Amino acid sequence: MSGVASVKSRFLAGLAALTFVAGIGLAQDKPSQPGASYLQPGTVDILGVLPPAPVAGDPRYEADRAIFRATRRFEGLPRWDMATNDARYGDAVMLKDFGCALGVALTPDKAPHLMAMFAKAGHDTQRETNIAKKFYQRLRPFLIDDGKTCQKPEELKDSFDYPSGHTTGGWTWALVLADVAPDRASQILARGRAYGESRIVCGAHNNSAVEAGRLSATVTMSFVHNTKAYSEDLKAARSELAALRKTASAPAQCEAEADLVKLNIFAPAP
C-alpha cells in the first residue's frame, strides 16, 4: 500500500471515531479559541451563506486538483518555508506573523485588550467554520491526489478540508487588526490573504476551502462588528496599541516577507 493510500485508509477508519463537541466542532487544523464570544450560537446561518463544497464532477473540484498539483512546485523554496511557518498557530506566533504588516513587534503580555478581542472573535468565527466542516466533511487535497505537504499528513488526517480553519483564524486576525490599526489595514489584509494562501502552498487545503474559510470569517465578523461589546473592546485596543507604538520596536526582515506576500502563487511556473 502506498504512503498516500495508507494515510487515506487511516483517515477513513478514523472518521467513525470523530465526535462533535458542542460549540467547537470536529477535530480541525486550528483549535477553537477558548473563552467568551461576541455572538450567541445560531446568530449566523453559515450554511446558508457559504457555497457548497465542490464535489466530483463540479468544475471547482477539478480546479482545486489542478491548483494542488501545480503548487507542489514550491517545495524547497522560500514560499514553502513561509507556508510551513504559517502552519503554526498561537498568540505569540500570530503576533509575530502580522508584525511586519502592523509595523510593530508585539507580545501577548503587552497587549491584553487586543488578545481578548482575538479570543472572542476567534471563538465565533471558528464555531461557524466548524459547522460547515462537520456538514461537508470534504477530504483534504493530499487524500485525493499524491503530493507533498509542508505538514505531516498524520497531523491533519482526522480533520476536514472545507472550509479551512487556519484561513478562518488568520483572516479573523487580519480583520481585527485592520480595525485596530486602520492606517495599516492594506498591509494587514494582504498578510491575512497570504496566510490563507499558505494553506494551498502547504498542500493542507484546497483553494476552495481557503476561499470558504475567508468568507466564513468575513460573514461572522460582519455580525461581530455590530455588537456593543466589540465596539467597546475596539476602543480599548486602539488606545493600547497607540501606547505600545511609542515604545515597541519594529520587526525585522520585513522586506523579504513583503516579497513573499506579493508573490502570485497561482501564476504558471516560469
Image (cartoon, rainbow, N blue to C red):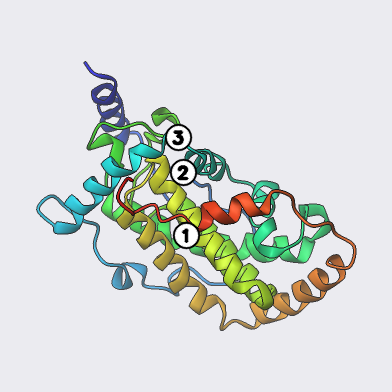
Residue of label 2: 29
Closest to the camera, between mark 1 and mark 2, is 2
**In the rendered structure, which disc, 2 or 3, sits on the residue that comes first in sequence?**
2
Q: CA distance from mark 1 to mark 3?
A: 26 Å
Q: Nearer the viewer, residue 116 or 200?
A: 200
Toward the front, the furthest residue is 270
Judge from the rendering whether residue 121 lies leftward or rightward of residue 108; answer left or right.
Answer: left
Q: Measuring 73% from the left and 63% from the top, which residue is drawn there?
A: 103
- The CA distance from mark 1 to mark 2 is 13 Å
Eye-nearest disc, 1 or 3: 3
Q: Foreground: 99 or 128?
A: 99
Q: Which residue occupies the foreground of this view, 17 or 167?
A: 167
The amino acid type of the residue labelled 2 equals Asp
> Which residue occupies 43% across, 63% down?
214
Which mark identifies residue 51?
A: none
State the residue position of label 1.
Answer: 127
As drawn, the label of residue 150 is 3
- Tell me the amino acid under the disc marked 1: Arg
Determine the image quadrant of residue 48.
bottom left
Residue that sits furthest to the top in the current view: 1
Number of residues whose C-alpha sits closer than 10 Å to that of mark 3, classed few (under 14), some (14–19) or many (20 or more): many
Q: Secondary structure at mark 1?
A: helix
Q: Secondary structure at mark 2?
A: loop
Between disc 2 and disc 3, the foreground one is: 3
Q: Residue 187 lies in what quarter of the image?
A: bottom right
Observer able to see residue 26? no
Residue 3 spot, x, y in % from top left: 29, 20
Q: Is residue 12 left or right of residue 83?
A: left
